[in-house]
Structure formats: structure tokens, C-alpha cells
Amino acid sequence: MPQPDPASVADERTDHELMTAHVAGDPDAFGVIVNRHRDRMWAVALRTTSDPEEAADGLQEAMLSAYRNAASFRGDSAVTTWLHRIVVNACLDRLRRKAVRPTVPLPEQDVDFGGKVLADPTDHLQTQELRIEIERALATLPFDQRAAVVLVDIEGYSVVEAAQILQCPAGTIKSRCARGRAKLAVRLADVRNPDGNPTVGTTSAKGGERKK
Amino acid sequence: MSDLSDSNDNDSTPESGVEGTNDRNERDDSVTKAASQSDGATTDLVGSIAETPILSSEQDDQIRSILATLPRPVMPPSVAASLNEALAAESASRIAASTAPPVRDDLAQRRSRSRRWLATGGGVAAAGALALVVGTQVTSETAITAGPAFATSFPITMSKVHYDAGGLAAQASSQVPRWKAASGSVATTVTAPPPDAPLSPAASVSASTMAQSQTPVAAESPSVTTNGVNAAMRDKLAGCIQKVSDKTPLSVDIATYTSPVDGTDQQVAVVALPAEQDKVDVYLMGVACTTSDTQVKAHITVNSPSASAAVDATPSP
């Protein structure tokens, strides 16, 4: 499992400082930023495209674009917010170009979703199955709703931050999240309640950990 | 692409329809509240509505808690390697561009290409006009590009001293001896401070960064990046400096500056220029400056530390 470059972790400069250093010609600064946040950006790219290959290509496009256009970053928002905006836009562009409807090629084994949050190893298979179903359900959402749900409910961004990333009003993010969750509820109803009870989530989620 | 956007959502852009969106959200909230009040009825409702059901707040929370349990995927090694390679290649091309032949040659090539293109499409008047405009812009840009001699005629340091608008005069004044010492030719009346000389309290700089700041960037090695300042950066700053003054700087120091407008810290080039009566003109320019936008954050004229601090202070955003 690749770990961020220790040098990136050890670098005590803030993201803003690194960005300005990059603009000033520091050849290593941007790499430090990428290594610092790459897993989070990968998560967003993967879940918004629902396709590992598209996510990898979109993320690479986004990072190169950010590298070249770093001078346009004015510091009005966090560097991560700016980067995530570029990532989401790159992923959306790729989906538009290829006119790909998210058809759930999601990761049975290809993508490592990690297992350390499992509370009880005996629940591994059941939990893994649930995760796959959630990812599949996510992939069926329209892009706008999926991106909002991924940023707010999964990655833990605030509504305001998500609004900055997706460049729309906070109210729109709330609306998209609500609609997205509602659709997820329907799609997950069978998984959560195989006996047919349509109530969503009758058992509490295990081992959850908000990521921010 | 209809399959990528929610056609039912009819979301507004930030520029328009904000009120409409809020109105819709209020409607959503009221519907949700009404649904949550009816409790058991909502359960049936969720199962029966096909597309966009209405969730009670409890169900909404449950979905959110389920989503929150998803672990963050780790970037696969192959993707990480590919990304690092792409960025390394981009960095290499950036460095190569900074050590490329003089702009004159590049201009000649561009003009040559432009002429060939014009010869090929000579019948297209609009294209010809476009090429003329581009050619004019390139010529104009080249005319104000700093020459190599000027770009290497002053020392550049990267002290990371932090300046702010309120204390700029005192901070800049305290740095004058160092700037003059760095210039090596102007400091005839000012003695460079000893290594352990105390700094002005206003100048928030650590001993380590001070030591680093006293090492000028190697001017004679354009391909070498020292303290994060490379030849391309030096040339760019030289062009910016020539836009604000025709004098050779005593010193240029890469530092940070707190904007009085929004309070954010910005990386700036502190340009110290000789002025009359042993004073020093100090410009704080954004490091992303260009010859068309010098990004002067502040301009101040200071005396030596022993004299009064500031004259003609003109902080700007």
C-alpha cells in the first residue's frame, strides 16, 4: 500500500506556502501538496466517476492542470478546496467527453477500500458486501447529486466547502444531498432489510468514523 | 449531457436563481418535516415512491451514518506512480523551459512559424490580422523582458521574513543594512550587521531563516535552483522590477506579507532599490508578477535604522 512520501509529511510548510513556493519556482513544492492530499483526492475522483480508470485519468489531468495554473490560485479558499474543484471538474469533463453513464464497474477487488474501520472481523464479508452495494448505489446517482453526497456525507466537507468546490450555492448542495440520500435509501432498502421492510437502516452503522 | 446532471434537480448557478434554490430548499424542508411527523406513514411512503422519495430526518441521518462508514480508498500504487511520473515530467519540462535559449531565438522561431502559416493561408485575411496582433504582442512583451545582464546584477535571497502593513516601515528599515551589505557596492556608509546582531522586534524572523537569507542565490548558474529561486524566477522578477524602476536593486528577498485587505499571507519579492540621500525604495511585489501586472503590494521609502523610519509610505492592497 503506497504511503505518502515521508518528505511530504515532514515538510512543515502550509499548503498556501507550498503553493506560492511552487509559483516562485520551487520544483518540489507541488509534489508535496499532492502527496499530502492524494488519497482524499483519489477518493473523490473514484467515487464521482465510479470507475477507477476514469478516476486515475481524471485525477492526473486535474493535477497537471493545477500544476500549470497554480498562479491563478488567489488564496481565497483552501488549497484543498481549489484542488478538489479541479478534480471534480476534470472528472465531470471526462464523463461528458466519453458520454459514459455510470454503469457500476466498481471495485470488487480491484480497488483497495481499506479494512481498518471494521469493528468486528467476523462481519467482514457482510460489511464488504454492504460497501459494494453502497458504492453501486452511489454510482447510479446523477453526477451532481453524487458529487455532493461524496463530498459532504462521505468525505466530511461542510456544505459551504462543498459549495465552493462544486461552485454552486450552499442551498443547492443541501438539496442535492437530500435528493441523493433519498434515492440511496430506496436502492439500499433491500440490502439493509432483506425481509422486505422498506425502512432504511434499521441497524446502526458500525465502526463509522467521520473523516473530517 | 442529460445523464450526467439531474434534470429534475434544476439547480441554480451561483450567479442566478439563488432565491429560487432557497425557496425550493424550504419546500424540501417543510415536506421532510411533515413526513417525519407522520412517522409510520413515512415508512410506507419510502417504499412506494420510485424516484425521489421523501425521507424523515431519522432516515436521513441513517443514510448519512451509513455513508460515513465507508472507508477512504487508498490510491493504488500504479496510479500513484503514474501521477508522480506525470508531475516529474511536467517539472522537468518547466526547468527545461527556464534554461531554454534566449527569448530572441524563440521569438524568431515564432515569427518564422507565423510567416510560414501566413504563406500557407495567405488568402485568409482574418487569419493574417490575427497573426499580426500576436506578433505585435510578442514583440511588445520581448521589449520589456529583462536582459540577462540585468537579471544577474542583483542578489536574490529567500529569507521568508514576514512583513505586515502595520509594521512595514520598521521591518524594512531594520533590513536596510543587510540589503546594502548584500549589494556589495552601495553600502559605503552602512556597516553590515554582525551575524549575531539583534533584529528589530518587528521583524519576525528566526535565526535559521536569517542564516539562510544571507546566502544569495547563485546568479551564475541559471539552471540551478537555490532556495526555491531558479533562473526563470530571476528573469521574471527582473522584468517586473524594470517596470517600476530603472535602477539596479540592492537586493531582492523572497518573503511573506500579510495583506491588509483580506488578512491572507502572500509570498512577495521585497525589492530594495537605492534612493536619494542614502534612503532605500522598497517595493513588495507578488511573486507571480508579470511585466503587465507587477502586483505591487506596497511601496515605502526608508532610511537607515539609525534615522527616522519611514518616508512616503504607500501601502497598497
Image (spheres, coloured by chain):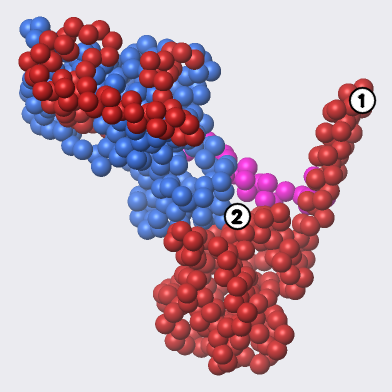
Chain colours: A blue, B red
Instruction: Where is residue B180? Give x, y as percent.
Output: 63, 82
User: Which chain is home to disc 1?
Assistant: B
Instruction: Determine the residue positioned at 50% across, 18% down.
Output: A96
Can you tell which quarter of the image residue A112 is in? top left
- Type of residue at label 1? Gly
Q: Are marks 2 and 1 on the same chain?
A: yes
**Front position in the image: B23 or A196:** B23
Assess disc 2: are there few (<14), some (14-19) or many (≥20) residues with their C-alpha within 10 Å of its C-alpha: many
**Front position in the image: B241 or B26:** B26
Classify residue A95 as left or right of residue A176.
Answer: right
Can you tell which quarter of the image residue B42 is in? top left
Instruction: Determine the residue positioned at 51% across, 50% down.
Output: A74
Instruction: Where is residue B163? Give x, y as percent.
Output: 49, 71
Quarter of the picture containing the C terminus of chain B is bottom right
Assess disc 1: are there few (<14), some (14-19) or many (≥20) residues with their C-alpha within 10 Å of its C-alpha: few
Q: Is residue B96 magenta?
A: yes
Instruction: Determine the residue positioned at 57% across, 42% down.
Output: A69
Q: Is residue B289 magenta?
A: no
SS at circle 1: loop
- Type of residue at label 2? Ala
Reply above or below: B268 against A69: below
First of labels 2, 1 by sequence position:
1
Q: Which residues are magenta?
A: B80-106
Reply above or below: B82 against A131: below
SS at circle 2: loop
The residue singled out by tag 1 in the image is: B122
Instruction: Determine the residue positioned at 75% across, 73% down.
Output: B247
Q: Does the rendering let one see residue B9?
A: yes
Q: Does the rendering let one see residue A39?
A: no
Q: CA distance from mark 2 to mark 1?
A: 38 Å
